[in-house]
Image (cartoon, helix red, strand yellow):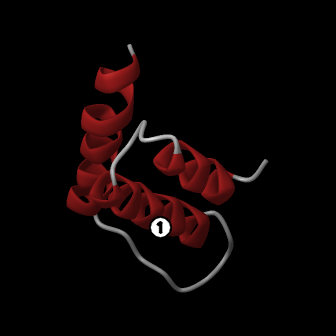
Amino acid sequence: MGESDFLDRIEALSIIGKNVKAQLKGCLDLRNGCGHPNSLKVSVNKSAAHIETLLQNVFEKFS
């Protein structure tokens, strides 16, 4: 199952809300954009914000 499909399913099961899903989808899109050679540049602050979103909405919730 792809990550995007996973987010859809856990939202449908009310494990995460609509806004959390939107933020995590944005993180997924950013990760995918950085994972392939292109001209996208990401700053340290953007990277830190990405990690902070994951920590607060995934790791803290499910740990």
* On screen, residue 48 above or below 22: above
Q: From the viewer's perspective, is 26 left or right of 4?
A: left
Query: Quick one: which residue is furthest to the right in this view?
Result: 1
User: What is the x, y in percent for residue 42?
Assistant: 37, 69
User: What is the x, y in percent for residue 22?
Assistant: 37, 64
* On screen, residue 57 above or below 19: above
The quarter of the displayed image where residue 15 is located? top left
Query: Quick one: which residue is furthest to the bottom in this view?
Result: 39
Count of numbered labels shown in the rendering:
1
Q: Which of 42 and 61 is in front in this view?
A: 61
- Point 38% across, 13% down: residue: 63
**Kind of residue sitting beneath label 1:** Leu
* On screen, residue 63 above or below 60: above
User: What is the x, y in percent for residue 37?
Assistant: 67, 75
Q: From the viewer's perspective, is 37 left or right of 20?
A: right
User: What is the x, y in percent for residue 29?
Assistant: 52, 68
Query: Quick one: which residue is furthest to the front in this view?
Result: 13
Residue identifier under label 1: 30
- Point 38% across, 42% down: residue: 16
The quarter of the displayed image where residue 55 is located? top left
- Point 74% across, 53% down: residue: 2
Callout 1 environment at 10 Å: few (<14), some (14 to 19), or many (20+)?
some
- Disc 1 is placed on an element classified as helix
